[in-house]
Amino acid sequence: MSGKVIFLLSVALSSAQQLCTPGASDGYKVRLSIRTALGDNAYVWSQNELFLFRATLAFAMRNHFDGQDFQVANIIVCDETPRVSFWFVVTWPDDATRLVDGGEVEQAIRKSRKRINSAFLLNDWTLEFVGIAPTLAASQLPATPPWLIAFGVVMGAVGAGFIILVVSAAVQKRRKKKENVEDVAEDEDSDVEAPAPKPLKNGSVRHEPSGVSNIAFSDDERVTQM
Amino acid sequence: MSDTAMDKTRDVQEEVTWNNKIEYMLTSIGFAVGIGNVWRFPYLCQIYGGGAFLIPYLIALVFEGLPLLYLEMAIGQRLRKGSIGVWKNISPFLGGVGIGSMVVSFLVCNFYNTILAWVFWYFFNSFQNPLPWSQCPLNINRTGLNEECVKSTPVNFFWYRQTLNITTDIETSGSLQWWLVVCLACAWLTMYICIIKGIQSMGKAVYVTTTLPYVVLTIFLVRALTLPGATDGLVYLFTPDWEILKDPQVWLDASTQIFFSLSVAFGGLIAISSYANEKNNCEKDAVIVGLINSGTSLYAAISIFAILGFKANAGFNSCLKENILVLTNHFEFSDQNITADNYDHWVEYLNQTNLDELASLQLRPCKLKTFLDQSASGTGLAFIVFTEAVLEMPGSQLWAVLFFLMLFSLGLSSMFGNAEGVLRPFCDLNLVPKWVPQELITGAFCLMSFLISLIFTMGSGNYWVEVFNSYVGSVPLLIIAFFEIIGVVYVYGMKNFSEDIYFMTGKRPNLYWRCCWTIISPLMLKIVLIAYVVLQAQKHPTYPAWNPDYELFPKTEVKPYPDFAFAVIILLCAMPVVSIPLVALYKGIQKVRERSSSREGRNPYGNDAFEIEAQ
């Protein structure tokens, strides 16, 4: 009796082994780079970890096929290496000799890729399914391109600078006019000196429409020495 | 009347001068120190044998750079006019030199601000996480990454496609890229607001634009020295290769680099000095500006190469990592058994045991030197190599922002000098009536330049910038500088010039200056000019084109310039210098006509109040 059981078990095992071979068409190779990803916090790969992997895969298969109760036993692993890489195949829960089609397995893994990765604290590149490309992150295009915001800020500053310049120029002009008015009023009030034409600095030219300057005498002293 | 009352009522046309000496020095230094100090000199230093290049560079500085600098600053300060007025004063036949300077400055203004527009674009794009040049965008179907990006690199793709949207060759113009137009407008508006009040506003702006680059370079240097690989870059940069001194090309490049780096012959230095105090010691100023310019080049080279050393190290490490992964996957070794440190041992071991398998893997050979050799100059350094380096540094956004801010300051301070080199002589021409305010003239200049530089925002814009860069800022400047020095030393006379300098500084120029001005500098300039023209004329000019359909893509395709581009090149070289003979001819004809006609010259001692009585 026990012999029969052992025989059946070995047949089952061998058939399972035959189902999972490196290079199987419906199987996939998995590579884990735990030390690369986690460095000093790396965990050691053990049979327990392998069990978790098989369980996670079964979870992924269940997610993909509604109603099918995949078990850990349905995930068959072979050809383990110290790299931490191995091949796996998936069998149907109701028929352990039939393999789930490779395409379906790929879709199932794709759907639950993030969950599988997070179970092992890895990412798409450190937990590699050879043949299943890592999912590309969808580019998040914000509503306004960020560079326009920076541009708006700079232009706003420049515009503010212009406004300040114009305003300050106008204010200065008004202040000068007020001073001139006050000067003229002062001059009119003070009776000390008779109003004389505005004196000129030595060598400068009076800008009047009439009259021609005689530059031959420009270097003369304004006040002759005694 | 008291003296104070006399002083209060000043003449309307009073001269404009710098507020203080510092503003004057900062503007001069800012004009001389430009983007070329950061992206041209380190490259030359590297390809010409590191420390050994400093020898021809310093010799060129001492015998060619400093004398020209002193000459320009002295005549500007003495004659107190822009380049046109100055040369008219020295000799009416040399008025064309001033016009040539003005034309060159104007052409340079146009394309230089386009570079600033690119810097602005990168600056704006640095405020996002992740940086847009760090990864490839998805392609149209969203099935994979953009093909052009994958074949080249994300950094190249961002520069050639998303910034320039470059066409395949110079003949295909493409359309105006709106984002570049916007950035160009921004650059010109910033420029306008800084020069709107002439040197009053410029003098304030240079406090920031001239000092900021030094601060940023120091920050980069300190940061780079704390990163791995920086010392490799510095060692590589400065390891002297004395053999290189035998190559005449090195001496030529050193002379041209000094010449273009100091920004002589643009007329900008003359314009800047014309606002200086009349009794200012321009000898000391010239030496200071020259030494600071070269010092900045050296300092920038150190900073840049520290960063590039870090980048090469990062590239080398990633190359190693790739190979390690291939080996680990193929031979099923345990993860991280092979590391960067024991990589060589493993390869040796595998060579002995599994030679065939190893060969079949076709590993990429990783050598640090290959990565260090991947340098570039010009826009390639700033927008491709350096942006890639910044990606590897922690806190990339900050470094990118700082870098582009520095480039912008460097460019803007040089633009100030260029603008002065156009506006000051333009005022000398007295074409515009006096009641037109200076702000309007400056605004018109900025608007016109903006409209012309829209050419460079088209698809083929980068190719045209290269054309302008290589041909406007080279041969015409050499010719103008040659005529400058001959004009002052031989036409104006060394004696007169010495007297002027005695008037300004209180002492006559010593033997070194006189020797350089009369013999050494003109000779050097002549040799450099002839050698440069001969070298350029030997080969039909070509340009590197970015063509995604090229078979060797991502290498750039080397194409010869088409005929119309060639015609433009000749025009650009000839336009500035053609004024020299034209004006000389015109004045010559005028003089001949005057001499032959009646002697009705203005007698300066004539008293027009009395009519000349007919005999």
Image (spheres, coloured by chain):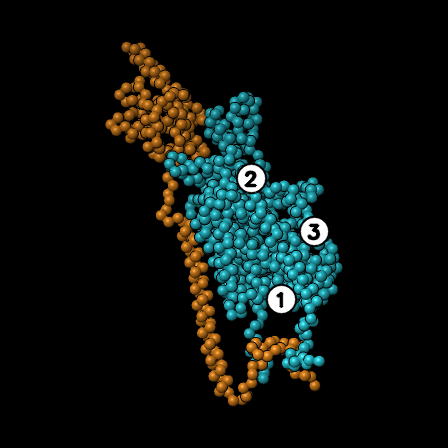
Chain colours: A orange, B cyan
Q: Nearer the viewer, mark 1 or mark 2?
A: 2
Q: Which picture quadrant has residue B130?
A: top left
Q: Tell me which residue sits at (42%, 40%) in the image.
A: B137
User: How many other residues sit within 10 Å of disc 1, few (<14), some (14-19) or many (≥20)?
Assistant: many
Q: Position of residue B578 (x, y in %)?
A: 63, 55
Q: Which mark is residue B189?
A: none
Q: Earlier in the sequence, mark 1 or mark 2?
A: 1
Disc 3 target residue:
B526
Residues tagged 2 and 3 counted as in contact (Cβ below 8 A): no
Q: At which x and y percent is residue B200?
A: 53, 65
Nearer to the camera, B25 or A40 = B25
Question: What is the chain letter for disc 2?
Answer: B
Q: Secondary structure at mark 1?
A: loop
Q: Residue under circle 2?
A: B559
Q: Which residue is mark 1?
A: B80
In contact (CB < 8 Å): disc 1 and disc 3: no
Figure check: A33 above or below B470: above
Residue B354's place in the image compared with B36, above or below, is above
**Marks 2 and 3 belong to one chain:** yes
Q: Amino acid at mark 2?
A: Lys
- Give percent across and percent down for residue B10: 56, 76
Q: How many marks?
A: 3
Quadrant in the picture for residue B83: bottom right
Q: What residue lies at 50% left-to-right and 38% top-to-bottom?
A: B547
Give the residue type that dot 3 points to: Lys
